[in-house]
Amino acid sequence: MRKSLLLAAAMTLGGGTILRAQSVSPSCPDGALGSQAQVTQDACQKAVDLFNYMAPQLGTVIAGGNATLGQGGTLGGFPHFAIGLRVNALMGSLPKVENVQPNLTGAVQSDYETGDQALGLPAVDAAIGVFKGLPIGITNVGGVDLLLSASYLPEYSDEGIEVTVPDGSLKIGYGARIGLIQESLVTPGLAVSIFKRDLPVVSIMADAGTESIEVRNLEVETTAWRITASKNFLVFGLALGGGQDRYDSGTIINATAGGFSTGDVEMGQELTRTSYFADVYFNVLLAKVVAEVGMVQGGDVETYNRFDTPADDSRLYGSVGLRIGF
């Protein structure tokens, strides 16, 4: 899964059909016949489209579904806590860039075939009870949990691709959960949460001899709000939820083609998608073994080149993890 995520990041930068954007990006201007701008325009535009294609998939695998796997309501105040190890996975698709060569006389619209690829990212999540809430009948309302996460992305070098993490491999996420109903023997747990998780800043160099691409400071930031409900049935439990993800992605690329360089090209994307999911967990003493499946959809991603699977297509994702708590 580590290699699949790195490959996905590199594809953002490398080299039914839906056609939406009919014009070339302003970041990739044309020029006189044989000029640097004309020779590199197509390589520049394809890099922009590949970034726009892969950024939403990276955002989803970072954000995941439930803020805390198998948890719907709040924990019940201090000193209650939960800590878990999870692996998020997305049923993604990677454009087969090796089948399309950049044109050296200006931008042309190319057809990209894509292949199914699972993209994964491990993470550690923690929740700490801060406020129990106000008692109403047999439950509490207005409880507050502090949410934390940690994602790790190692440096990588193999087969012409070098991945570095200039700001460190570890990235800390944070958020909060507010309880609408605390779970009890007869009532389900119900809560609203907001969580900010980001990918560690990545720089990538891909060298294919006469063609190369440098990506500096690739950032993928996510903010997700969720409303979740859960109920424990002694041996097992269920959690359901949904909400919205906001992805804010950006990077700087420098590509070479035909002996010319594009120079630094800045690109970015902001996208909002709807996410919904279901968790099932099994109780093993103080631990819970959790599996999650979800779907993300919506948003509008425009590309000049064509992909057989749209960039804003609905995507299936899931998580598996182990959570302990008190």
Image (tube, grey):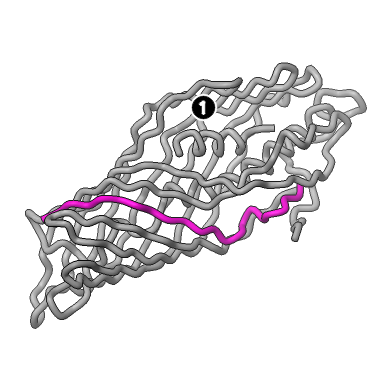
Horizontal relation, residue 87 to residue 258: left or right: left
146 up-or-down from 99: above or below: below
Measuring from the top left, give residue 325's x and y in whole percent: 15, 54
Which is more toward the observer, 72 or 30?
72
Horizontal relation, residue 223 to residue 191: left or right: right
Is residue 320 a member of the stretch shown in magenta? Answer: yes
Q: Three-letter amino acid code at disc 1?
A: Ser
Quarter of the rendering containing residue 226: bottom left
91 up-or-down from 178: above or below: above
Find the magenta span and give its range: 305-326
Quarter of the rendering containing residue 71: bottom left
Q: Which residue is mark 1?
A: 203
Q: Residue at 67% x, 56% y: name it.
A: 310
Quarter of the rendering containing residue 315: bottom right
Measuring from the top left, give residue 127's x and y in whole percent: 21, 52
Q: Residue at 34% x, 54% y: name it.
A: 195
Q: Quadrant of the C terminus?
A: bottom left
Secondary structure of the residue carrying numbered label 1: strand
